[in-house]
C-alpha cells in the first residue's frame, strides 16, 4: 500500500486505511481505559456539584453541549471534514479530549505547580504557573491523544487537514470539559444564590470571547505536525520529526501567550484583542493545510475519476470550500433551490468518491459511489433543465 507522500505526487496505488475499531491493538484498549477513568472522574465531579448547585450543573451541561454542537454542525455541513474520517474517529477524538486528557491533566497540573512553587517560589508559581504549566502539560497530553489515535489507525492520517481535524476535536473536547468544570466552580463560589449568572459569565468569557483561540485551535496546530510526519514519508525522518516538534512549539507558544501575565487583558474587549492575533495566525495555518488537501484530492481525482463523474471545473474546486460554494450559488441562482440542494448533495458525494479512491483505489465501494454520483448528476441535470440557464458544471459526457 502506498500514499501521497508529497503535494502533487503521482498516485502510485490504493491507500489502505485502518479502522478506528482495533480491539487487537494495545493502543485501543489504553484509550478505552483512559475514557472510562475520565468518565468516572467527570461524572463524580458533576454529581457532587449537583448536590450544591443543581441548576448550574444542568444549565451548564445544556449550554456547553449546545456550544459543542455548533462547530460540529459547521464541520459537517460546511467544511466536509467528516468525510476525512469515519464517525468513530471523531467520537474517540472528542471523547479523549473531554474525558481522557482532562482526567490526566488535573493531577499533573497540580503536581507541576507544586514543584514550581517549591523549586522557585510560591510567588513565581502564582504569577507564571498558568503560563508555564498549562501549555506544557495540557498540550502534551492532548497531542499524545492524537498520537494514540494514530497508533490505533495509522493510515487514517493521510493528509495535514485530516490530522488537523482530529486535533481540533481533541482540543474542543478538552476545552468544553474544562469550561464546564470552571462553570461548576464559579457557581459554587458565586457571591449570591443565583445559579444562572455564573453559567452566563463563563459562556461569555470562555466560550464567546476566547473560544476561537483556545484548546481546539492549539491542538489542531500541533496535530498538523503529526499529519506532516505521517504523510510525508519521502522526507528524511529527522525533517519530519523537526516539523512535528516545530508545530507543537507553535501550539505551546500560543497557549503560553494566552496564559501569560505579559498580555493581561483589560476588560472584555481586551480579551478579544489579545486572542485575535492568535486566531489570525491559526487561520493562516489552516488555510495552508487546506491548500495541501486540495493538491492531494485533485491528484487522486486525476488518477482515478473521469470527467463524466467530476468535470474539470468541479475537479479544480474539489479542495476549495470557497470554489465549491461559488458553484452551488450559481446552480441555485440559475436553476432554483431544488437544483441547488441537489448540486450540494452531488458535491458531497463527489468528495466522498475521491476519498474512497484515495483509501482503497478501484474497489466495489468506489464503484458504488461512482454509480451514486452518476444518479445524482442525472437528478441535478433533470432539475436544472426545468429552468432556464445553463448548468454551472454540466456533465462532460
Image (cartoon, grey):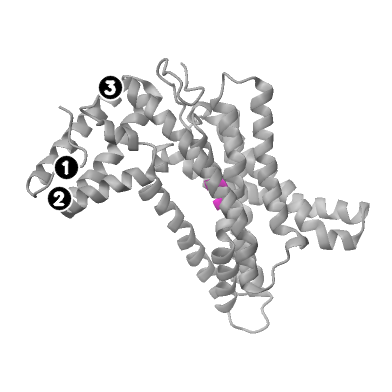
Taking the spot 28% from the left edge, 37% from the top edge, the residue there is 349
Relative image position of residue 388 (x, y in whole percent)? 9, 49
Disc 2: which residue: 335
> Percent from the top left, x then y, of residue 200?
55, 74
Tag 3 secondary structure = helix
Q: Quick check: 228 above or below 236?
A: below
Q: Earlier in the sequence, mark 1 or mark 3?
A: 3
Range covered by the magenta-colored residues: 169-173
Can you tell which mark lies on residue 391? 1
Q: Nearer the viewer, residue 107 or 150?
A: 150
Q: Mark 3 packing: few (<14 Cα in 10 Å), some, or many (20+)?
A: few
> Residue 62, relative to residue 143: is it above or below?
below
Percent coordinates x, y for residue 295 in the rendering = 43, 30
**Residue furthest bottom in the image:** 192
* Residue 351 drawn above or below residue 360: below
Asked which quadrant contains residue 145, the reply is top right
Q: Is residue 346 visible?
A: yes
The residue that mark 3 highlights is: 364
Measured in 3D between alpha carbons, the distance from the residue under mark 3 to the one under mark 2, in whole angstroms, is 33 Å
Q: Label 1 vs label 2: CA separation?
A: 8 Å
At 69% from the left and 57% from the top, the residue drawn is 258
What is the crowding at mark 1: few (fewer than 14 residues within 10 Å), some, or many (at least 20)?
many
Q: Circle 2: is it few (<14), some (14-19), or many (20+) Cα within 10 Å?
A: many
Amino acid at each position: 500500500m502506498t500514499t501521497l507522500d508529497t503535494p502533487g505526487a503521482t498516485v502510485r496505488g490504493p491507500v489502505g486505511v485502518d479502522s478506528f475499531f482495533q480491539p487487537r491493538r494495545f493502543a485501543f484498549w489504553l484509550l478505552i481505559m483512559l475514557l472510562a477513568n475520565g468518565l468516572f472522574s467527570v461524572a463524580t465531579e458533576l454529581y457532587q456539584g449537583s448536590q450544591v448547585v443543581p441548576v448550574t450543573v444542568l444549565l451548564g451541561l445544556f449550554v456547553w453541549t449546545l456550544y459543542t454542537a455548533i462547530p460540529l454542525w459547521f464541520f459537517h455541513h460546511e467544511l466536509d471534514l467528516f468525510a476525512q474520517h469515519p464517525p468513530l474517529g471523531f467520537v474517540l477524538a472528542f471523547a479523549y479530549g473531554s474525558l481522557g486528557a482532562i482526567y490526566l491533566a488535573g493531577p499533573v497540573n497540580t503536581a507541576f505547580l507544586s514543584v514550581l512553587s517549591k523549586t522557585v517560589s510560591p510567588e513565581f508559581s502564582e504569577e507564571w504557573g498558568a503560563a508555564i504549566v498549562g501549555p506544557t502539560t495540557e498540550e502534551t497530553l492532548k497531542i499524545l491523544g492524537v498520537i494514540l489515535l494514530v497508533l490505533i489507525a495509522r493510515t487514517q492520517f493521510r493528509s495535514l487537514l485530516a490530522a488537523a481535524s482530529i486535533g481540533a476535536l481533541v482540543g474542543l473536547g478538552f476545552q468544553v470539559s474544562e469550561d464546564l468544570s470552571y462553570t461548576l466552580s464559579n457557581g459554587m463560589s458565586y457571591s449570591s444564590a443565583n445559579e444562572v449568572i455564573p453559567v452566563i459569565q463563563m459562556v461569555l468569557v470562555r466560550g464567546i470571547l476566547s473560544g476561537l483561540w483556545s484548546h481546539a485551535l492549539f491542538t489542531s496546530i500541533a496535530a498538523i505536525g503529526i499529519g506532516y510526519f505521517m504523510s510525508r514519508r519521502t522526507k528524511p525522518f529527522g525533517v519530519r520529526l523537526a516539523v512535528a516538534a516545530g508545530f507543537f512549539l507553535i501550539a505551546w507558544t500560543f497557549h503560553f501567550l494566552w496564559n501569560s501575565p505579559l498580555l493581561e487583558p483589560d476588560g472584555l474587549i481586551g480579551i478579544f484583542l489579545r486572542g485575535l492575533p492568535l486566531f489570525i495566525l491559526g487561520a493562516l495555518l489552516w488555510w495552508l493545510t487546506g491548500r495541501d488537501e486540495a493538491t492531494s484530492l485533485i491528484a487522486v481525482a486525476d488518477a482515478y475519476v473521469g470527467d463524466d463523474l467530476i468535470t474539470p471545473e468541479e475537479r479544480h474546486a474539489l479542495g476549495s470550500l470557497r470554489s465549491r460554494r461559488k458553484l452551488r450559488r450559481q446552480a441555485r441562482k440559475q436553476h432554483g433551490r431544488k437544483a441547488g440542494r441537489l448540486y450540494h448533495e452531488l458535491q458531497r458525494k463527489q468528495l466522498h468518491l475521491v476519498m474512497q479512491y484515495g483509501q482503497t483505489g478501484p474497489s466495489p465501494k468506489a464503484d458504488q459511489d461512482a454509480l451514486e454520483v452518476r444518479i445524482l448528476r442525472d437528478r441535478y441535470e433533470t432539475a436544472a433543465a426545468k429552468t432556464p440557464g445553463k448548468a454551472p458544471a454540466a456533465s462532460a459526457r
